[in-house]
Image (cartoon, rainbow, N blue to C red):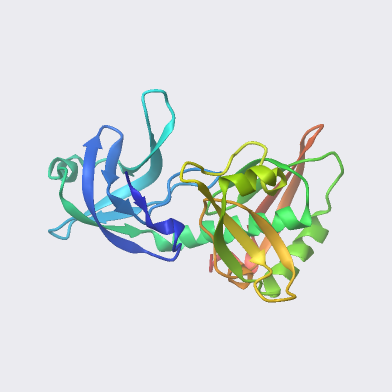
Amino acid sequence: MTEDLFRADAYLRTCEARILRMDDTGIVLDRTVFYPLGGGQAGDTGVLVLADGRELAIADTRKAKNEEGQPTNEFIHVPAEGQAGLLAALKPGDAVTARLDWERRHRLMRFHTASHLMCHLVPVPVNGCSITPEYARIDFHMTDPLDKEALTAGLARLVEAAHPLTVGAITDEELDANPALVKSMSVQPPRGTGTVRTIRIGGGNEGADQIDFQPCGGTHVANTAEIGAVIVTKIEKKSANTRRVVLGWAPSAAAAA
């Protein structure tokens, strides 16, 4: 099992860990700050710093799978190509320091939170999404047209309002009793512990408006103001019942992103 430190604190950039096992797919640690591909969010990259100071570049992070092809609670840190010598020096039990590519992760966090704001602006089910460092794509199950300028203005308003984000949890029974909390038609929230992690935007103070509340296992910023200048770059009609919204960095924010 890999202890997923990012669930409780998405701002952790490093952690000390030990190698549980290695195989052709990559390296499994006993704990990590690296988020594995899932829920539409890309897997993290970074380095594993060895005891002698050498750094093993990690190109991706994925969930391990069992013999039936189902995800397990182990995370695989996938090494970049061309590091055979470093890999040969590693063995189970070795201590390493896992260090994120923080700038890339922070872009993912900002886009992921922005995608939740889109769920407030377009309150219909989501039938697909992709969160990358360069763009976010959200597919909405709907037939009505969407206005790019109006959505961009709505995002700017919610970002500027500096709504706080709170990580919480509800029980499986509470989620089953409120199935509408799940906005995604294609991705179900992580289960297996009896509780389901939730993300709440707004509603932190008495009388404050709640902007969005849904189960989510991804990483997010602590306040919408941290998102920065995100715009709707494209709206597409992908099918009779799907409207795709693509988010990108505003030109003024592209360099800072």
- Outermost residue to the top: 68
Work out whether residue 137 or residue 183 is closer to the camera in this orientation and state it: 183
Q: Position of residue 123 (x, y in %)?
A: 78, 51
Residue at image x 52%, y 56%? 108
Q: Position of residue 10 (x, y in %)?
A: 46, 62
**Toward which corner of the image does residue 228 lie, by quadrant?**
bottom right
Q: Position of residue 116 (x, y in %)?
A: 66, 56
Q: Is residue 194 visible?
A: yes
- Outermost residue to the right: 144
Q: Is residue 101 above or below residue 88?
A: below
Work out whether residue 116 or residue 179 is closer to the camera in this orientation and state it: 179
Work out whether residue 43 or residue 218 is closer to the camera in this orientation and state it: 218
Residue at image x 59%, y 58%? 199
Residue at image x 36%, y 23%? 67
Residue at image x 59%, y 70%? 223
Q: Quadrant of the N terminus?
A: top left
Q: Is residue 6 above or below residue 146?
A: below
